[in-house]
Image (tube, helix red, strand yellow):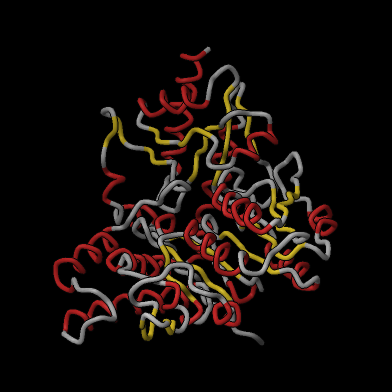
């Protein structure tokens, strides 16, 4: 007889919330309700303190000095790389530390795609991509003669997998797909998508910006060629992130930027470049930021990403249930598999006006096109409001948001 599975200890989410200093403040005389974590996540005290401690106690450049501070800085920086690699189940020597997802995607565009693509080749994207996974490919296409193609979505905001498979023609060399939509919250089946692409010899880049904050991510199991992530959405400092790439790609890719640290030997006759991942990390990096990101990874792992996913699913269910009761409110993006992101509009109100009035009630939501103009065009709207939750939010905040929304709706009627 099998022994029963060990009980999962209950998490005191109110205690977890106390770890985030900014959430204690007021806005316009009202308690802050921060529903903009898809824009940037709030930082626990441990991350703030780790960043502060680096500058107070260890500040030096990495990989350039043999003195104690230099060694400490290098170990802290490389330690953050190892922590992040373990968090997403990849090798540390396949993880390039960057300023975020945008830099990571541009690195692939200029170092991998630009030397390989030419006339007759195609880059395949989806309608729900962030501008960071559109514009670099347009720039590459303009320089190489390649073509950018788009796969559409369903009215509910799910990716049309049949259309995607049909679009995977022999001339497609790269597929760029978002793991979780920053507008719709849709969670794409990236493992299945990458398997489809791999069978057809198509390289895959997954934008993981909105996935890492919400759920466990096993990059090795996804089976992509490239995975881009950003640190500031997962409780880490701004200006941090990473690109994971298969080792064979990193070995074959020329440097994207030239300068210090990415070299072994320099002469005026030529340069010998460093091994990956350092080949792609020219100049002085955001050392303190990545030290803070390593601490953010420790913090998230201490709670457990599965527990975070379950907590946010519970909050999302409550939020959507309450929002559906608001007269004249339209939720945009109703795919069955969603992260805790809800885009919405209220009849008769512009998104910016709605967000401004909600701010006066202490509620922070984002309004605009969310760096997704093609997606706005698909739904026939210029902008939406977006309420995005994190595990540090509460059911009481949801009730406060709905009360504020009802009040604002009456003002705009």
Q: Position of residue 387 (x, y in %)?
A: 50, 39
Q: Nearer the viewer, residue 198 or 153?
A: 198
Q: How many marks?
A: 0
Q: In the current view of this chain or complex, which residue is farthest to the left?
A: 56
Q: Residue 321: horizontal and vertical position, in percent?
A: 60, 37
Q: Nearer the viewer, residue 355 or 110?
A: 110
- Say which residue appears at 68% left-offset and 42% top-offset: 334
View extreme (front): residue: 269
Image vertical order of residue 293 relative to residue 162, above or below? below
Say whether residue 47 is left or right of residue 137: left
Q: Quadrant of residue 355?
A: top left
Give the position of the N terminus as an image quadrant: bottom right
Q: Is residue 17 left or right of residue 204?
A: left
Quadrant housing residue 285: bottom left
Taking depth in this image into account, of 205 and 412 the one nearest to the observer is: 205
Question: Does 323 appear above or below 81?
Answer: above
* Residue in front for this viewpoint, 15 or 51: 51
What residue is at 56 percent from the left and 40 percent from the top?
Answer: 342
Residue 253: horizontal and vertical position, in percent? 56, 75
Q: Residue at x 43, y 55 (%)?
A: 233
Residue 292 in percent (x, y) is at: 31, 65
């Amino acid at each position: 007889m099998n022994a029963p599975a060990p009980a999962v200890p209950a998490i005191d989410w109110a205690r977890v919330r106390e770890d985030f200093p900014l959430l204690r403040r007021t806005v316009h005389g009202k308690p802050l309700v921060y529903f903009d974590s898809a824009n940037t996540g709030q930082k626990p005290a441990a991350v703030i303190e780790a960043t502060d401690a680096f500058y107070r106690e260890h500040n030096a450049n990495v990989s350039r000095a043999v003195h104690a501070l230099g060694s400490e800085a290098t170990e802290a920086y490389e330690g953050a790389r190892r922590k992040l690699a373990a968090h997403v189940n990849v090798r540390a020597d396949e993880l390039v530390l960057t300023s975020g997802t945008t830099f990571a995607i541009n690195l692939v565009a200029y170092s991998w795609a630009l030397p390989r693509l030419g006339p007759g080749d195609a880059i395949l994207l989806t309608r729900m991509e962030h501008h960071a996974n559109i514009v670099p490919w347009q720039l590459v296409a303009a320089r190489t003669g390649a073509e950018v193609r788009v796969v559409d979505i369903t009215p509910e905001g799910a990716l049309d997998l049949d259309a995607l498979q049909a679009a995977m023609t022999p001339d497609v060399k790269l597929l760029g797909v978002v793991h979780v939509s920053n507008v719709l919250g849709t969670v794409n089946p990236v493992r299945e998508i990458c398997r489809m692409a791999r069978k057809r010899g198509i390289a895959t880049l997954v934008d993981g910006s909105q996935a890492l904050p919400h759920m466990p991510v096993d990059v090795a199991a996804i089976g992509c060629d490239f995975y881009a992530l950003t640190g500031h959405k997962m409780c880490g400092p701004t200006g941090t992130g990473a690109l994971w790439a298969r080792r064979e790609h990193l070995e074959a890719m020329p440097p994207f930027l030239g300068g210090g640290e990415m070299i072994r030997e320099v002469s005026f006759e030529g340069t010998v470049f460093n091994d990956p991942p350092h080949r792609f990390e020219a100049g002085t990096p955001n050392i303190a930021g990545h030290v803070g990101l390593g601490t953010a990874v420790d913090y998230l792992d201490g709670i457990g990403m599965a527990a975070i996913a379950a907590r946010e699913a519970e909050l999302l269910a409550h939020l959507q249930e309450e929002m559906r009761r608001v007269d004249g409110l339209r939720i945009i993006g109703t795919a069955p598999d969603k992260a805790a992101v809800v885009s919405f509009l209220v009849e008769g109100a512009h998104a910016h006006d709605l967000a401004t009035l909600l701010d006066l009630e202490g509620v922070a939501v984002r309004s605009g096109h969310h760096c997704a103009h093609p997606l706005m065009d698909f739904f026939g709207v210029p902008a939406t409001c977006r309420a995005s939750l994190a595990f540090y939010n509460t059911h009481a905040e949801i009730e406060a948001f709905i009360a504020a929304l009802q009040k604002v709706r009456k003002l705009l009627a």
